[in-house]
Each structure stands twice: as C-alpha cells, then as structure tokens.
C-alpha cells in the first residue's frame, strides 16, 4: 500500500506570490507523488487568491461543517483546484469571516491581523476535520508555516485515539517566516479541545512566533530546517530537541532528501 503524506501549507504558488516556502508547497508534494507516495495538499483560501483564474470550486460533500472557536460558530467551506501539469489537487480551507480579506497575514498597511490566532486555529482544525471526512489516514503529516503550528498538538493529543491519526508521524518544517507581534492573550483558550489539558498548552502561552514554533516542535516526531538561516533561538531548540532533524537540503535535490527522510522516519 502506498504511504500517505499530508502537506499542511501556509503558502503554495501559483495561488500566492512566489516565495521559497510557496515553491516548496508547490513542488515538494508533486515530487513526493512522483516517488510513488499518495499525497494531499492543503492551504488557507486567502482572499487575495483569484478564484476564477485558478479555477477554485467548492467541494459540497466536504463543506457544511461548523467549527466552534471561543464559543462562536464558524462555517467551514472546502474548495479545491487542480495543478494540471503536476496531476495534483490543492484543497483550500475557507471561511468568509477569516479568509475573504484581500491579504494574507497583514493588511495593506502592513498591520498584523488581530484575529490571526483564530485564523490559525480555524485553519488547523479545518484541515484535520476535512481529512477525517475524507477518511484518509496519513502516515506522515508535514506542516509548513506557523499558521499550521497547532496541527501537531491536535494530532498528538485531541486525535491520538482516532484510528486515522493514531499511527501518524508529524514533521515540522522551520522557515525564516517569523513575526514580532503577539497573538491574543486568549489564544490558548481558543486552541483547547477535548483531549487537550491546560498543561499541554503551556508552551503556546506567550503567543509569540517562538512560542508557536516551540509548541509545533514539542509535538512533532521530526524536524526540518527548511531555509539557509533561521532564528538562532529556534535553531538552538532544534539542536536540543533530540529528535530526527533534516538539515537544510538545498534547492537542487530536496525531493530526494525529503523522500529519504520520510522513509527513515516510517521505518523507525
């Protein structure tokens, strides 16, 4: 049976402007699929994505759920688009309140969106709820970008007894995509779900970029340094984690490096 890799991305080109992270989000899943693995790829449906040009359409059978965050109901809409030359689909997590503004994490004046905490929670939970509805059990979940940083916690705590995720390995890729702002003081309250204790959330309490990445790494099985330079504090945490680490694989043969890293993690 083919091994299954779930990619939880913050950026994927051509849907967002090209960056190193968005290029990895586009070409790594294709490369891993060509290595013979089954893949699923997700990203947020940010409002600056042109739906008509990119031919996004709603997946009615997957939409229709509501996620409760901070006692508020938020409709979950799933959209999909195809990258024909890669024979690959990309799933989009959508919600009118969180993802219809014409920006990603900052507005046109460069101001950090005040609800980025709820957007991260909605995105992370939305991906996992969609995978549950698909009935698709991933062998590896690989997260890219801080907006997916809560996914490892949910898999290892809230979903640890769910048969779709009970054997799943989680990998966090670290990029140089930090921010200096803090998420809201109620961030950990908004994260909480059945199966998650207050003590599990302590690592996230400061709401900083460092706290998010520290939490993602704490609940991951393996880590990737996915750019030439990263925050020195995070670099030190990776060195001290005792977990399998893939150093920056470069831009040429990174698909081979990731495929080998996946195989080694699954064989152990």
Image (cartoon, rainbow, N blue to C red):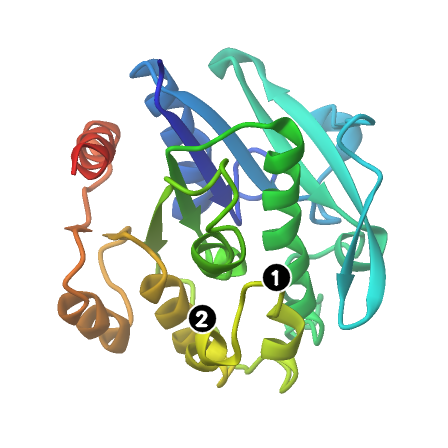
Q: Is residue 140 left or right of residue 147?
A: left
Q: Is residue 202 left or right of residue 223?
A: right
Q: Position of residue 114 (x, y in %)?
A: 70, 76
Q: Give whichever of 45, 213 is nearer the camera.
A: 213
Task: State which quadrant residue 139 falls in.
Answer: top left
Count of picture labels? 2
Q: Position of residue 258 (x, y in %)?
A: 24, 35
- Could one spot residue 265 in this view of the protein? yes
Are discs 1 and 2 less than 8 Å apart at CB? yes
SS state under label 1 = helix
Q: Give whichever of 167, 214 is nearer the camera.
A: 167
| Residue at figure coordinates x 36%, y 16% from the top left | 2
In the rendered image, the vertical position of residue 121 relative to residue 259, given as above or below:
below
Please name the residue that numbered disc 2 is placed on: 212
SS state under label 2 = helix
How many other residues sit within 10 Å of disc 2, few (<14), some (14-19) or many (≥20)? many
| Residue at figure coordinates x 22%, y 72% from the top left | 237
Q: Position of residue 115 (x, y in %)?
A: 71, 71
Pick the quarter of the image with the N terminus.
top left
Please name the residue that numbered disc 1 is placed on: 120
| Residue at figure coordinates x 69%, y 28% from the top left | 80
Q: Give whichever of 100, 242 is nearer the camera.
A: 242
In the rendered image, the vertical position of residue 177 relative to residue 93, given as above or below:
below
Q: Position of residue 81 (x, y in %)?
A: 66, 25
C-alpha span from label 1 to label 2: 11 Å
- Tell which circle, 1 or 2, labels the residue nearer the N-terminal end: 1
In the rendered image, the vertical position of residue 155 relative to residue 185, given as above or below:
above
Pick the quarter of the image with the C terminus.
top left
| Residue at figure coordinates x 49%, y 76% from the top left | 201
């Amino acid at each position: 049976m083919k091994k299954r890799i779930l990619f939880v991305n913050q950026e994927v080109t051509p849907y967002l402007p090209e960056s190193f992270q968005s290029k990895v989000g586009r070409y790594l899943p294709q490369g891993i699929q060509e290595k013979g693995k089954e893949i699923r790829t997700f990203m947020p449906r940010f409002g600056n994505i042109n739906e008509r040009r990119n031919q996004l359409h709603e997946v009615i059978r997957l939409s229709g759920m509501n996620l409760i965050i901070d006692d508020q109901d938020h409709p979950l809409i799933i959209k999909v688009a195809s990258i024909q030359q890669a024979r690959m689909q990309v799933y989009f997590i959508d919600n009118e309140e969180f993802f219809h503004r014409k920006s990603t994490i900052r507005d046109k004046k460069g101001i950090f969106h005040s609800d980025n905490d709820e957007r991260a929670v909605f995105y992370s939970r939305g991906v996992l709820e969609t995978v549950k509805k698909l009935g698709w059990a991933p062998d590896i979940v690989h997260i890219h970008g801080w907006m997916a940083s809560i996914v490892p916690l949910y898999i290892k705590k809230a979903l640890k007894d769910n048969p779709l995720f009970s054997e799943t390995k989680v990998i966090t890729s670290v990029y140089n995509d930090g921010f200096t702002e803090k998420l809201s003081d109620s961030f950990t309250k908004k994260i909480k779900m059945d199966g998650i204790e207050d003590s599990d959330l302590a690592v996230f309490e400061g709401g900083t970029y460092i706290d998010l990445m520290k939490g993602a790494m704490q609940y991951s099985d393996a880590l990737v340094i996915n750019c030439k330079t990263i925050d020195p504090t995070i670099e030190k945490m990776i060195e001290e984690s005792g977990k399998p680490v893939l150093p920056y694989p470069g831009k040429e043969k990174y698909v081979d490096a990731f495929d080998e890293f996946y195989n080694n993690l699954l064989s152990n």
